[in-house]
C-alpha cells in the first residue's frame, strides 16, 4: 500500500496537470459513471491529501475521495490519451494530459460533510500544515500497545506505512516492542520531526531514502540497495542482512499483520 508521501505527491501531480482546468471526466469501467457525468467539464479547483487519502475538488463543492488501497494505481500521460482499458475506474483528460485510476479501494463522490468526517477519523499527517503532533502523543502515551503498532494506526498518525515505521524507529534506536506509554515526549518529538523531514524528501524525490549521509553506499563503500521499492534504507526488507551500523543480522517478525524489521542491537532504547 502506498505511504503518505506518495499520496501527497499524487495530489501535486493532479494539480500540476489539471487544476483550474475543466477536464473531461469518465469512468470506462462504469463504476463511477454517474458521478463522472456530473463532474465532466467542470473546473477542478484544488487537490488535497491526508494520510493515505486523496481528494480532488471540483466546482460546486464536489469532492472525489480516492484511497488506493493495496492494488490502486495512478498513471499520468500526455495527450492524446490512448484508448482506456476496461479496468479504468476514473479518467481525467485535458488538451495536454490524461490520468487513469485503476483498482482503488475507494473512488467516490463525497459531500463536504462526508469529507470532514474522513478527516475527523484520521490522525495528524506529518505532511500537512494543520498537523498537531501533540494530539498523536497524547494517544500514544496512554497506550500499552507497541509503538510499532501505534505508528501504523491511521487514527493516531496518518500516512506512515511499513517502511517509515521501521526506518524511523531504527534511526532513533527505539525497540519496536516498547509500549507507547513508555515513549517520552522528547522521543516522540524526535520521531515526529524526523518523519516530517523524511516524508517531505519522499514527496520531492518520489521515493523513500532514510539513510544518513554518512551511511550511503558511497560513504560506506558498500553496494547500493537492489529492491523493487528502491531507496536506501537501514532495516526495511533487509532480513538477515548485516546492519549498516553494527553488522548484527536484521530481524523480522509479524506485527499488526505486517512484517516488522529491526536491529536487535541498535534498537534497545
Image: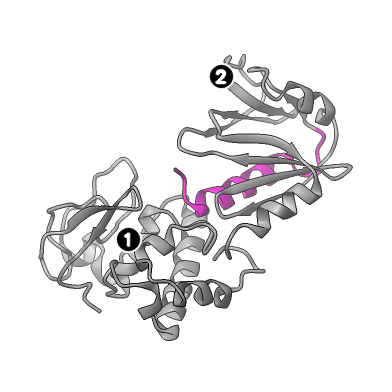
Query: Which residue is most to the right?
Result: 60
Q: Residue at x 47, y 58 (%)?
A: 153
Q: Residue at x 34, y 72 (%)?
A: 179
- In the displayed structure image, the side of residue 6 where residue 222 appears, left or right: left
For the residue carrying disc 1, how many other residues have a C-alpha within 10 Å: few (<14), some (14-19), or many (20+)?
Answer: many
What secondary structure is found at the residue carrying circle 2? loop
On the image, the x and y values in percent for residue 7 come to 56, 48
Q: Quadrant of the C terminus?
A: bottom left
Residue 212 visible: no
Instruction: Out of 40 and 264, give the one closest to the viewer.
Output: 264
What's the distance in space between the residues labelled 2 and 1, CA to CA?
34 Å
Residue 8 seen by the camera: yes
163 drawn magenta:
no
Secondary structure type for disc 1: helix
Residue 29, compared with residue 70, is above or below; it is above
Magenta-colored span:
1-22
Residue 165: where, in percent of width, then height?
A: 37, 61
Residue 85 place in picture, x, y as percent: 57, 15
Q: How many marks?
A: 2
At label 2, counting other C-alpha atoms closer than 10 Å, the crowd grade (few under 14, some 14-19, many 20 or more) is some
Q: Which residue is mark 2?
A: 87
**Quadrant in the rendering for residue 268:** bottom left
Mark 2 or mark 1, which has the lower sequence index?
2
Asked if residue 23 is positioned above or below residue 45 in the image, the reply reads above
Residue 217, quarter of the rendered image: bottom left
Residue, disc 1: 166
Amino acid at each position: 500500500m502506498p505511504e503518505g508521501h506518495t499520496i501527497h505527491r499524487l495530489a501535486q501531480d493532479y494539480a500540476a496537470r489539471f487544476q483550474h482546468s475543466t477536464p473531461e471526466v469518465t469512468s470506462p469501467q462504469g463504476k463511477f459513471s454517474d458521478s463522472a457525468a456530473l463532474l465532466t467539464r467542470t473546473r477542478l479547483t484544488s487537490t488535497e491529501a491526508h494520510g493515505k487519502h486523496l481528494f480532488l475538488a471540483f466546482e460546486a463543492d464536489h469532492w472525489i475521495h480516492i484511497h488506493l488501497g493495496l492494488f490502486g494505481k495512478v498513471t499520468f500521460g500526455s495527450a492524446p490519451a490512448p484508448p482506456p482499458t476496461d479496468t479504468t475506474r476514473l479518467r481525467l483528460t485535458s488538451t495536454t494530459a490524461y490520468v487513469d485510476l485503476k483498482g482503488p479501494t475507494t473512488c467516490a463522490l463525497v459531500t463536504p460533510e462526508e469529507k470532514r468526517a474522513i478527516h475527523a477519523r484520521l490522525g495528524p499527517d506529518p505532511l500537512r500544515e494543520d498537523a498537531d503532533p501533540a494530539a498523536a502523543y497524547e494517544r500514544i502515551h496512554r497506550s500499552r500497545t507497541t509503538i510499532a503498532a501505534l505508528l501504523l494506526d491511521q487514527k493516531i498518525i496518518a500516512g506512515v506505512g511499513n517502511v517509515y515505521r521501521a526506518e524511523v524507529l531504527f534511526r532513533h534506536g527505539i525497540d519496536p516492542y516498547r509500549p507507547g506509554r513508555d515513549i517520552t515526549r522528547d522521543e516522540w518529538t524526535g520521531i515526529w520531526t524526523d518523519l516530517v523531514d523524511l516524508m517531505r524528501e519522499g514527496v520531492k524525490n518520489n521515493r523513500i531514502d532514510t539513510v544518513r549521509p554518512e551511511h550511503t553506499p558511497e560513504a560506506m563503500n558498500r553496494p547500493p540497495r537492489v529492491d523493487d521499492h528502491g531507496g536506501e534504507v537501514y532495516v526495511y526488507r533487509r532480513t538477515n542482512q548485516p546492519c549498516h551500523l553494527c553488522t548484527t543480522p536484521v530481524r523480522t517478525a509479524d506485527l499488526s499483520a505486517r512484517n516488522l524489521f529491526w536491529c536487535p542491537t541498535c534498537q534497545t532504547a
